[in-house]
Image (cartoon, rainbow, N blue to C red):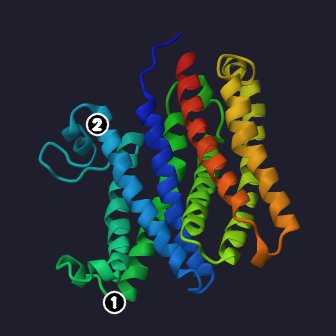
């Protein structure tokens, strides 16, 4: 077996980054398409997304061993900005940097309106500026979506057969991250005893994304079985099969999807039981994390 070069901290980074940016763009898109009805969701998404990306960046820097190495992908020898479009690491570093700048400014426009933070000197420049908030949010939006895809694209750019034998890894990571982001928002809404109509609405959206994710998973495995059968065997009936079938497919996708569909079909918006959405959200988050762990480790196992 090939020595594991990317440890579990990378899987945690992939999960944290995907969950964070997905919560961010989910909040902005929900608020945009509702014409300002879901401002609170946009704020929750900002409060989830930016801190998680910062945590993910710290994990990435720690894994590099030399913190200054991270900036070598952004600044050249003369400390001038450089961009290497052919380098996935350079691309990813710039995506993370751009999102942190624009998304961080967007989050500050929300923080500036919080009662406990109104006296903070720096925040006065971000207070009561809806135009700035809107601009920063839209500037950060494409970077958030690209980061959610990028984690899969990064793996696909390597020589590992499990990662580069299918073009659907980026799409899978995008859908998995979106479902995780929705689940995080649902947990926040439930923890703050929010309007059950909101929880109902986002449970509906999560169920749709879960169905799409399951379809993409099936297509990915069919393609992988044809292009890299040894890699597919590791997941389907090899050393990672238990985590794959039970952790990812059963408890990470099918069980929460069945729970969501049953609860949504048998409940009305104003009487929905929040226990089911919360439980399914926890399972989805666990499944999303296991997806990254299993794909990361299985990809290195036969590389």
Q: Earlier in the sequence, mark 2 or mark 1?
A: 2
- Residue 58 in sight in this render: yes
For the point 66% across and 21% down, the residue is: 231
Tell me the element at label 1: loop
Q: Is residue 287 above or below residue 109?
A: above
Q: Nearer the viewer, residue 101 or 156?
A: 101
For the point 23% across and 45% down, the residue is: 71
Residue positioned most to the top: 1
- Locate residue 27: give its quadrant: bottom right
Q: Which residue is mark 1?
A: 128
Q: Is residue 194 above or below residue 294?
A: below
- Locate residue 289: give its quadrant: top right
Circle 1: is it few (<14), some (14-19), or many (20+) Cα within 10 Å?
few
Where in the figure is residue 32, as x and y percent of width and height?
57, 80
Q: Nearer the viewer, residue 73 or 23?
A: 23
Residue positioned most to the right: 266
**Residue 62: which disc?**
2
Q: Is residue 191 above or below residue 43?
A: above
Tell me the element at label 2: helix
Residue 222 located left or right of residue 284? right
User: Residues under labels 2 and 1: Cα distance?
Assistant: 37 Å
- Residue 87 in sight in this render: no
Residue positioned most to the left: 78
For the point 59% across and 48% down, the residue is: 285
Residue 54 located left or right of residue 224? left
**Residue 24: which disc?**
none
Q: Is residue 86 above or below residue 225?
A: below
Q: Nearer the viewer, residue 262 or 12?
A: 262
- Locate residue 132: give its quadrant: bottom left
């Amino acid at each position: 077996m090939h020595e594991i070069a990317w440890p579990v901290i990378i899987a945690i980074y992939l999960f944290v980054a995907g969950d964070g940016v997905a919560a961010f763009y989910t909040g902005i898109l929900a608020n945009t398409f509702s014409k300002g009805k879901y401002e609170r969701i946009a704020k929750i998404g900002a409060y989830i997304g930016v801190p998680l990306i910062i945590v993910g960046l710290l994990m990435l820097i720690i894994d590099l061993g030399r913190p200054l190495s991270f900036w070598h992908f952004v600044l050249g020898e003369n400390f001038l900005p450089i961009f290497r479009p052919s380098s996935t690491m350079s691309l990813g570093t710039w995506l993370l940097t751009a999102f942190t700048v624009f998304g961080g400014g967007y989050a500050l426009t929300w923080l500036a309106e919080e009662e406990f933070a109104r006296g903070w000197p720096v925040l006065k420049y971000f207070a009561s500026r809806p135009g700035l908030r809107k601009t920063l949010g839209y500037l950060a939006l494409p970077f958030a979506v690209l980061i959610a895809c990028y984690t899969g694209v990064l793996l696909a750019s390597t020589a590992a057969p499990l990662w580069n034998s299918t073009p659907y890894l980026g799409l899978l990571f995008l859908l998995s991250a979106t479902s995780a982001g929705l689940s995080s928002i649902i947990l926040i809404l439930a923890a703050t005893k929010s309007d059950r109509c909101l929880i109902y609405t986002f449970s509906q959206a999560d169920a749709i994304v879960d169905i799409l994710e399951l379809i993409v998973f099936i297509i990915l495995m069919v393609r992988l079985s044809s292009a890299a059968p040894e890699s597919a065997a590791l997941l389907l009936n090899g050393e990672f099969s238990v985590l794959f079938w039970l952790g990812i497919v059963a408890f990470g996708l099918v069980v929460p999807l069945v729970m969501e569909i049953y609860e949504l079909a048998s409940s009305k918006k104003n009487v929905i039981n929040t226990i089911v959405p919360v439980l399914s959200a926890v399972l989805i988050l666990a499944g999303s994390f296991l997806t990254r762990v299993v794909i990361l480790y299985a990809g290195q196992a036969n590389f």
